[in-house]
Amino acid sequence: MHCANGAGPAVHRTILCLDVEGFGRRTNGDQLAIRAGLYRALRRALDDSGVPASSCYCEDRGDGAMILIGPDVPKELVAGPFPARLATLIERHNRGAQPGARIRVRVAVHAGEIHHDDHGVAGTAINKAFRLLSAPPLKDALSASPGVLALITSGWFFEEVVRQNPACGAAAFRPARVAVKEFRERAWMRPPDTWPHADTARHLRLLALHPGAQISVPAAAALLDVPDAEARVLLDGLGLPERAEGRYDVPAPAGEPGLAPRERSAAVRRVLGWYLGTADNARRLLCPDRVTASLTLPDEPDRALPFASTDEAMRWCETERLNLVAAARVAAEEGHHDIAWRLPLALWTFLLLRSPWTDWYEALRTGLASARLLGDDRGVAYALGGLGYASQNRWRFEESAELFTAACKVFSRLGDVRGEAWALHGLGYACRRLQRYREAVGHHRRSVLLAAALGDRRNTGRALTALGYAYAGLADFGSSLDHFEQAHGIALEADERTIGWTLHGLGYAHHGLRRLHTAIAHYERALEVFREFGDRPGQGEALYNLGRAHMQMSRPDAARDCWMRALAIFEDLQHPRPTPRLRSLDPHA
């Protein structure tokens, strides 16, 4: 229902007004450059501060703007992170602008009831905000400072919002008597030289503790122990190069000591804990049913990034790969051994699917040593098992079998049935690669029984798949096919990620039974699934065996194409699989 004169009912809004100093004295070209720079900075500052564009109504004022922000947005964002972020972005604009196109702004913040009508918006609250913006004390504060932004708030906004929220920095405000036209009020003003640029040396020393060469805003927030929005302001204010959106170069370590040992250790633990928590969130999406120990650190606040999709989780892992590997090393070097053994396990799925095996292997070795130093048997068992899997990917199967045997003993002593089934699965695989197929059958059978006793359908299906490969090693392709079919039925019901390997197994069994057309069809379907889930080792194995089937059907060109693609994957992964025969197919070798 509308009021008279086409006006809508009153609605409550946070009111943000801005005015560019000396705008009317600029040339037309400079005015256009200022407006472009101002709106670019405004949009990013609002977004970075957590103010969504969907909650904003904006009116251009030529030399500034008025923005009305919906009641769903916390008001403290507009007086805390936003002006600090806007000041930083304006400074960045000014560094690359001609003198006439540089920006300095006055900003006023208030809140109250406003009306929308056919011509825009109106209300006494809006009038008050513009009177604050025109206040002589605000103009004088900006004129007397080399800074770029002076902020003023109404008395009500200061008492109800700024004073109640530490992020708004109430101590930096000072009272200002405002008398503009009919308006008289005691307002509160924050001068241009009070935005967060203090303690620069300490911030640089803290940032230099980061384990990698580049740092993201959330990682910096964990390290500095500040909100994300403030971390971005600090990073920009320190003048660190921004190599990509939200990613900055880490400063070189200071030549002289400047942090107390306790502060240094706490800062390192915060950022390592952030990497662990975020990597574990990624693992939960990438492989939610992967057997592993609890990776939660009860003494660390929950700062970890959440992920909305597996693609988002994988992109984060790829972007942070070097930092994550470095973090695992630094955790052990700095004595944070509980993080040192957990972090490689949190990285399990990503490093297994995408990364050179050496990264994972070295991190797990370090983690095992840390778990032993702590006397944490559960950590020792999982690190042994992780090393067993990493050794397999380095083609060290005797070593892998020894590691899994040791892991099984520790899991059995702890009564960890799920962990024992997981280690038996790896032990069986190592035995298959060593052509000890009867031993492999025994290990996989026990793994099937333990997983089934737990009611764990996913890992029962995986154990059945492994048992199918063990029977194939004994050339018992009938039993092999039977177990692959059982595993495929479970995978269709409970575990989409195993479907690729059951399809590959079905192809392998039919291949052994000389049913080559059927084998090729299963290999090709497996290849599609491996591509869908980003399983590059799986793609390499499927292409390798697909090439063998094509060659047996006298299709040398198709076989060569498959083998060349397999070779590219294996060599990119630093996988030992590429045999001299595969490499001989490469005309550039």
Image (cartoon, rainbow, N blue to C red):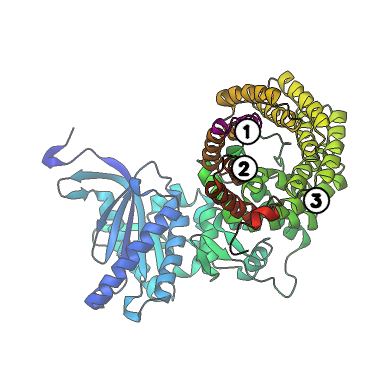
Task: Give neighbour class at mark 3: few <14, some 14-19, many 20+ (Cα, 10 Å).
Answer: some
Q: Is residue 187 visible?
A: no
User: From the viewer's perspective, is the residue at label 1 or at label 3 nearer?
Assistant: 1
Q: Position of residue 183 (x, y in %)?
A: 27, 58
Majority secondary structure in the magenta region? helix
| Disc with the residue nearer the chain's start (2 vs 3) | 3
Amino acid at circle 3: Arg
Which residue does the numbered mark 2 point to in the structure image?
A: 548
Residue drawn where x is 80% and y is 52% of the image: 366
Quarter of the view holding residue 348: top right
- Mark 1, secondary structure of its residue: helix
- Mark 3, secondary structure of its residue: helix
Q: Position of residue 177 (x, y in %)?
A: 37, 62
Find out whether the residues at labels 1 and 2 contact each other: C-beta distance under 8 Å. Answer: yes
The span shown in magenta is 504-519
Task: Work out which residue is located at the far left of the displayed protein and give it.
Answer: 5
Which residue does the numbered mark 3 point to in the structure image?
A: 365
Amino acid at circle 1: His
Residue 515 in magenta stretch = yes
Residue 245 in magenta stretch = no
| Disc with the residue nearer the chain's start (1 vs 3) | 3
Q: Relative to 245, does residue 539 appear above or below in the rendering?
A: above
Q: Relative to 286, does residue 26 appear above or below in the rendering?
A: below
Residue toward you, 398 or 95: 398
Which residue does the numbered mark 1 point to in the structure image?
A: 511
